[in-house]
Image (cartoon, helix red, strand yellow):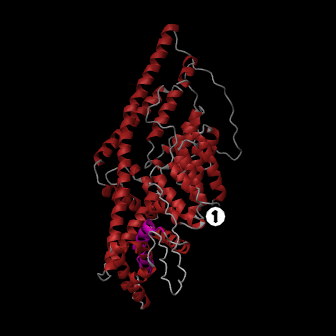
Amino acid sequence: MRVPSSVRAGWLMPALLSGVLLTAGAAHAKPKESKPAPAAESAPAAVVVPGAPDPKLRTQTFADYESQLASGQKARAADALVAIVSDPAQSPFHPEAYAKLGDLLLGLDLPYAATLAWRQGFVLAQDWDAETVGREVPKAIETAQKVGDIAVLQGPFSKNVGIARTEDVRGQMGYLAAREAFRQGSYGLSLGLLKLVKQGDPQFAQAKMLEGIVLNQQSKPDTALTSFEAAGKAADKGSSAESKRFLEMLKLNTGRSYYASGNYPRAIQAFASVDRGSEFWPEAQFERAWAHFRIDDVNGTLGLLLSLDTPFFKTYYYPEADLLRIYSMFMICKFPQANTEIDSFRAKYAKINDALKGWNGRSAEENFEAARKYRQDGDAGALPAMFWRSYASEERFGSSVKAVESADAELKRLKNVAANPFSEWARTAVKARRSELVELEGARIRDRIAAQQVEVDTMLNDSQIFTLDIMAMKTKLYEQAAASGKMPDVARTAKRDERVKRTFVEWPYEGEVWADEVGYYKVNTAPECPASLRTSVKGK
């Protein structure tokens, strides 16, 4: 039997993250001071390093800023910095001015605007010393995390990670730059940047996790397992929600690597270790079902899929689970049941397909707001909830929502600030980033929903393949019966008593679904394939 093209191999790497080519800023040497010349001779010219600001001109450029700051006029000092960054003639001093502007804006309770000022500084900086980089980078990262927009620093870091002078700062910048490269699909660059993160760095466990994901994307699952093992050793084993989430995600990705390498028993073991209360548990159940299917354990596959077919997972998007259930029934010649499942699949997803087609064409902003509304109050609107549910727990979208809310709150505060250069700069910068973020996230959601519509449409068409194959199999059975004068006998299978733990309690399934039973279903059904067909079915 042919497996429809819409049925996956059973695992996909989360597409956690988005890169530009690394342009490491070279460190510039400071101008050497010329030695005092003899009185009778003229002083030799000082050595000039291209791009290095003139110290005297720097003092003159920042004079107003220094004066206002010394008198406690922070707003006016910020105005002076905005005047510098707005003047193309002062471009050699823009990186420093942006860094100072970030510090001032943070002090004025404008953390988002401060983050955007630092971002500009990181883009332009080339000759910052280790002290400046060591001071500004951690401060910018901490502030960006608080407003929910750490992604805004990933691009600048990926372009200018060369400004890092010390290993600790290099590790922080390298990890975020690697995330950006991965998001853009530059896997080789991402791996190179991750090497900047050293063991002992706070980001080491996250870096090894990302390294494993990148290696899986490069079809190197065996090597990825080594990275995941290192991530597990370095991971925080604390009781915080963040630590627990990381460890559960690690189990899921480890299972995916074992699956991709063809080690299905170990994949099953890893998927089964995902905690039942984890947000990743349903995905682990589905992917574990595929692993059971690969070792011809159809009963195991059907038992796992039964959980995903309960009302508790009504809002989860698993059309492939339905196709896998149909295919499993076909493999053991349960043709009537398979036909019933096909009819049910087509009835369910035909309506869903129509709803998706009706949604297509909505703007990026409409998609963003729809996903945000579902995350906040569970209102799915015009689409089935299954297409919004993942955004209710997705870390990336959660950060984006937090960032938009931070931007809105900051713009509201800026309305109460006098109309002066620094507040206008901050207002413009925050509004632009908010619009950019909504467009980026909304477009991602829009494109994903459009892809899901194509996927559902394809699956509906492919479901016809199952019907045709079932008809072909029945025809073959009838031809054999006509030739022999009787229907072929069902192939004998070995009967083994299953060992059950003494503490195990069994309740037969009678159509009722209980929450505490989900995840523990077992199916025990014998194949109904004649010996003359069983080999040919398994061989396809």
Identify residue type, mark 1. Gly
Q: Nearer the viewer, residue 55 or 333?
A: 55
The quarter holding residue 115 reads bottom left
Which residue is pictured at 64% across the width and 42% down the height? Answer: 266
What residue is pinned by disc 1?
A: 238
Q: Secondary structure at mark 1?
A: loop
> Which x, y percent locates residue 139?
51, 73
Tell me if residue 259 can be seen.
yes
How crowded pointer 1 is (Cα within 10 Å; few <14, some 14-19, many 20+) is rated as few
> Which x, y percent locates residue 114?
42, 74
Relative height, residue 141 to residue 257 (above, below): below
Which residue is pictured at 36% across the width and 65% down the height? Answer: 433
Relative height, residue 167 to residue 313 (above, below): below
The quarter holding residue 207 reads bottom right
Q: Nearer the viewer, residue 212 or 476?
A: 212
Which contiguous range is marked in magenta?
100-126
Which residue is pictured at 53% across the width and 79% down the height? Answer: 34
Asked if residue 124 lies in the magenta stretch, the reply is: yes
